[in-house]
Structures are given as structure tokens and as C-alpha cells.
Image: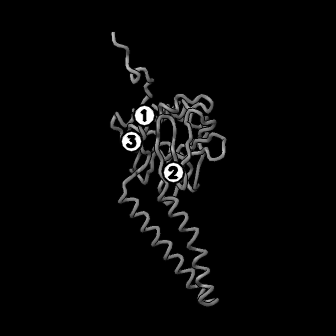
Amino acid sequence: MTEPSNESKKPTRPPEPERLALHQEDPALRRRRLFSGLAGVALFAAAFGGIGGLVGGEVVGLVVAAVVALPLLYVVLFAVRRRIWLEGTIVLVRTWRTRRVDIVAASRIDLLVTDVRGMRTVSLLLNARQRGRTAKLDLAVYAGTGGRELGVLALRRLANALMNNFEANGMVFSELLVAQLRSEARGDGAADRPLYRLASAAPAGRLAQRFTMDAVSRFVAHLD
């Protein structure tokens, strides 16, 4: 009999979980956002620099333009570089560096609804209570009776990961995403879907509204 080769004795590594993007990755869209952002920065810097130049001269105008441009430029570059992926139960957030947040190990989960210029964004806030271990995941953005939502695969994977979080009672948020998936499967319009209804329930006139686990639990309990 032939002895098994050494290669066959080596333990096989489990396959790495597939990385799934949780937001739009279109390069052309990112370039347009970058160019429009840079144009806005230049416009604001020129306007304030011109006012400063009229008051204090050319040097003052240049200093004012730089003071206005630098923080705005940082915000634009930060937004363009920001990327979010889901890898198994790990959320990876990249800006200037990449941080990893384990959904299963998150010690607190909240749902946030923001209202900016008539656009309401429904997001999950994951907090591991460690420095650099937080993540904000946008689930849906609505304007009027329409908008855009995370795809079915992303919602399903998030729901599965949340289901295994016991410390922050992730089951409640998992049930919300499952209800959203069922609504999509039935062919409900945007206005009849749970995430839209939750966004509409947030008080008007407030920039951000945080929904705790108890509030989301009560909302899910009254879903059809």
C-alpha cells in the first residue's frame, strides 16, 4: 500500500467569507462626487477669500480661503474614500484606515433616522464600546415615496449576523430586516415596507432620531 502524501495530511483552510459591498461602488459615481465636491470647496473658498481680501488685503484673503478650504476638503475626501463591506459577520469600514466591527460582538445596536433636505436615511449603529469599534450602516434612503434600499443579499446577510448577537438583542433588528425582505418578496410598494414606515414615523423637523432596541421591538410587534 502507498502511504498518503504529505500534502494530503495538511489541514485544509476553511474558505474565507465573501466580501460584500454595502454601498454603491460605481467608480464613475465616486469621480463625479469628488469633482462636484472639489468645485464646491473652490467656490466657498473663493467667496470667503474674496471677502477677506476686500477687508484685509491679499494675504488675509489667501489665509481666509485656506482656512475655509482645508476642513471642507477633508470632508469631501473623507466621504469619497469611505467604503463599507460585510465579510461574514464583520463590518469593514475604510476611510483613511480600515476598522473592523463584529456584528455578533457589538454590545449596543441602535437604529438612526436622519432627515437632510427631505431625504430620510435609515441606518444601523453598531457599537462595540471600544475605541475605533463603531460602524454606521445605511439600510435605506427615501425621498418622497421612492428611494433606494440595500439589496436582498445584503439584508439577508445582515439579518443572519444580527440574529447571533445576544448581548445587544440583535434578534429584534434581525426581525425588522426579515420583515423588510418579506415585504419586498410580496411586491409591496416602498410606502408599505417596514423601513419606509419606520422612517416616516420619525418626528419631522429633527436632523436625527435614534430608535432604541425597545422602540424597534414595539414597532416590529405591530407589523402585519
In what quadrant of the picture does the C terminus appear? top left
Residue 56 coordinates in the image, percent (x, y): 64, 89
Numbered label attached to residue 151: 3
In what quadrant of the picture does the N terminus appear? top left
Numbered label attached to residue 94: 2
Distance from disc 3 to disc 2, alpha carbons, whole Å, reads 20 Å
Distance from disc 2 to disc 1, alpha carbons, whole Å, reads 22 Å
Query: Which residue sits at x=55%, y=65%?
Result: 74
Crowd rating for badge 2 (residues with CA inside 10 Å; few <14, some 14–19, many 20+)? some
State which mark lies toward you, 3 or 2: 2
Crowd rating for badge 1 (residues with CA inside 10 Å; few <14, some 14–19, many 20+)? some
Vertical placement of residue 159 versus 61, above or below:
above
| Residue 99 appearing in the image | yes
Whether label 2 touches label 1, CB < 8 Å: no
State which mark lies toward you, 2 or 1: 2
Vertical placement of residue 48 versus 28, above or below:
below
Whether label 1 touches label 3, CB < 8 Å: no
- Which residue is tagged 1? 156
Residue nearest the observer in this picture, 64 or 94: 94
Crowd rating for badge 3 (residues with CA inside 10 Å; few <14, some 14–19, many 20+)? few
